[in-house]
């Protein structure tokens, strides 16, 4: 059900903008946590506020801080991973960037985020293997390594000298040039002239050609064997060093896990603070128990962005809901569904630990936020749209036994007849009104909804007088311009009071969209004759 609620609120449109920089922050992002504890949410908001203060006061340091966050890996601290230089490199890179990031924070922020650094000794040990993006088992870790590696280098020089001497001899005596080659392929006739030559080894390549290779001799083979022995010793020493370094890292595993937790908090909070600054989001005000919900200039960002791109005006939502059950009336295209989406969007953001796009948003924490509604053609498991709505309501209603719930119902039961729909809605809302842990919002165009204690709200709807004044004498226009006119003269403000009988804009909008004047006049006569 939560997935359906997020889809209704177009929550993923916003969540796609939430891009933590570290593996730890990205893992947290994928959890999509909906907090149900006011205390936990307060802690989230406090961290975001602290991050915002740092971003605003020290933008240059903030850029450096993000650089180090972006470079923090998630090292595998298992003995198997740390037994190899690659695993040790990731551990060193983690520690190096964590230390640098922590150092950029003010002391108060470090305390708030639990960013206490205490691994100078371990990092200094790992830094012997190189800095930046490099790490190797350096001579500094083991004195014998320097001698062994010097021996290997000496043998390499000796082998190169012997190889070049052999190549020179073959060029001069046999006319064979093995420069930068391990073998040559020559014709069989030419190769027959080398038969029995001790400095060349020949073997068939195909029916007419032969592969020839240099024979480097005893001195070369002895030097190569000596090098192999030195290389084996080098590997033994490197393995021993890896074990010692791995033990040193493992000894501080608990500290590194604390660093990872702090990095996650920092990454998530700084990303939330970035979004708050860029999108003009404000901290919500939370209460522990269901009560009044207040929105001041709340913006449903997905729609706001779409209207801005189309050059159309957007009206933020301002409303105060002092009752736990509320009915929102309005004509088609009048904005009641958008009002419901705005509330759902703000609530999901708040309970996901984000600041919200509003001048202010006061709400409470619910154990469940459930959307109940859907398209008329939606089916699942043989259920019609009406069947799905009833199933969703039953599921949400059952959840009230274990915790509070916010139910958002859009055009609920619209696929059945209005008389039965009104009876169902009155019974459902009446039941919810009697429960202290339930809060419900119904957007509907049905009349006859009468629930004791429920709040009633109406979208102001179409401004007929302003439209008539503007449209008088205007020539016919296309669909795009008609939609612009509806947007221009539709008043999306939500006012307390009203009922379904007052939502009378459908005929006007039908006329704007091109339905013939004769049909519009007849519809108006039928309405007046009721």
Image: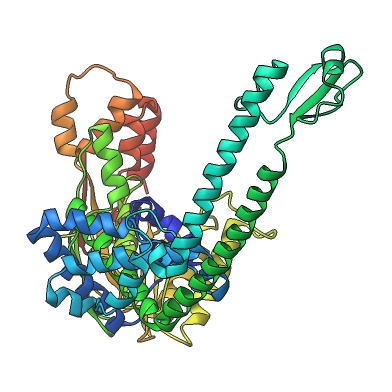
Give percent across and percent down for residue 100: 23, 64
Residue 525 falls in which quadrant of the image? top left
* Any part of residue 323 in sight: no
In the rendered image of this protein, does residue 467 appear above or below residue 394?
above
In the rendered image of this protein, does residue 311 appear above or below residue 496?
above
Q: Tell me which residue sits at (55%, 62%) in the image.
A: 234
Q: Tell me which residue sits at (23%, 54%) in the image.
A: 299
Please, which residue is most extreme toward the left here?
57
In the rendered image of this protein, does residue 430 appear above or below residue 155?
below
Is 457 situated left or right of 49 in this image? right
Residue 24 falls in which quadrant of the image? bottom left
Is 88 situated left or right of 311 in this image? right
Q: Nearer the viewer, residue 168 or 345?
A: 168
Please, which residue is most extreme toward the right here?
207
Residue 425 falls in which quadrant of the image? bottom left
Is 487 situated left or right of 253 in this image? left
Give percent across and percent down for residue 71: 34, 56
């Amino acid at each position: 059900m939560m997935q359906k609620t997020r889809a209704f609120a177009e929550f993923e449109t916003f969540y796609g903008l939430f891009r933590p920089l570290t593996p730890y922050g990205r893992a947290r992002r994928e959890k999509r946590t909906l907090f149900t504890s006011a205390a936990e949410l307060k802690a989230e908001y406090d961290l975001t506020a602290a991050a915002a203060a740092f971003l605003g006061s020290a933008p240059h340091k903030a850029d450096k801080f993000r650089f180090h966050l972006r470079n923090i890996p998630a090292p595998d601290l298992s003995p198997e991973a740390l037994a190899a230089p690659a695993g040790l490199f990731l551990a060193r890179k983690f520690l190096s960037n964590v230390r640098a990031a922590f150092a950029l924070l003010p002391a108060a922020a470090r305390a708030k985020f639990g960013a206490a650094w205490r691994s100078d000794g371990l990092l200094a040990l790992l830094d012997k293997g190189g800095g930046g993006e490099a790490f190797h088992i350096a001579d500094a870790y083991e004195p014998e390594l320097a001698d062994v590696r010097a021996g290997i280098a000496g043998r390499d020089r000796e082998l190169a000298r012997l190889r070049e001497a052999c190549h020179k001899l073959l060029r001069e005596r046999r006319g064979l040039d093995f420069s930068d080659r391990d073998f040559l392929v020559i014709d069989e006739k030419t190769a027959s002239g080398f038969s029995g030559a001790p400095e060349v080894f020949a073997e068939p390549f195909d029916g007419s050609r032969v592969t020839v290779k240099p024979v480097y001799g005893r001195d070369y083979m002895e030097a190569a064997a000596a090098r192999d022995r030195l290389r084996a010793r080098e590997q033994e020493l490197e393995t021993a060093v890896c074990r010692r370094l791995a033990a040193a890292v493992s000894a501080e595993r608990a500290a590194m896990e604390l660093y990872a937790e702090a990095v996650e908090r920092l990454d998530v909070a700084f990303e939330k603070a970035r979004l708050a600054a860029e999108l003009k989001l404000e901290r919500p005000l939370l209460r522990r128990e269901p009560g009044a919900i207040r929105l001041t200039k709340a913006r449903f960002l997905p729609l706001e962005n779409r209207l801005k791109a189309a050059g159309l005006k957007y009206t933020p939502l301002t409303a105060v809901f002092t009752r736990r059950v509320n009915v929102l009336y309005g004509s088609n295209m009048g904005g009641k569904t958008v009002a419901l989406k705005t509330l759902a969007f703000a609530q999901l953001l708040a309970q996901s630990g984000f600041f919200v796009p509003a001048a202010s948003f006061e709400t409470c924490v619910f154990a469940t936020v459930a959307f109940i509604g859907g398209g008329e053609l939606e089916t699942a498991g043989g259920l019609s749209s009406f069947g799905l709505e009833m199933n969703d309501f039953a599921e949400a209603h059952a959840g009230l036994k274990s915790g509070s719930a916010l139910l958002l119902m859009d055009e609920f039961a619209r696929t059945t007849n209005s008389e039965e729909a009104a009876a169902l809605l009155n019974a459902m809302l009446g039941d919810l009104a009697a429960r202290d842990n339930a809060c419900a919002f119904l957007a509907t165009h049905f009349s006859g909804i009468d629930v004791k204690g429920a709040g009633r709200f109406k979208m102001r709807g179409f401004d007929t007088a302003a439209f008539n004044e503007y449209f008088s004498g205007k020539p016919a226009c296309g669909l795009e311009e008609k939609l612009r006119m509806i947007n221009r003269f539709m008043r999306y403000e939500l006012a307390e009071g009203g009922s379904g009988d007052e939502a009378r804009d459908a005929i006007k909008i039908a006329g704007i969209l091109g339905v013939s004047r004769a049909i519009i006049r007849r519809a108006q006569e039928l309405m007046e004759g009721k």
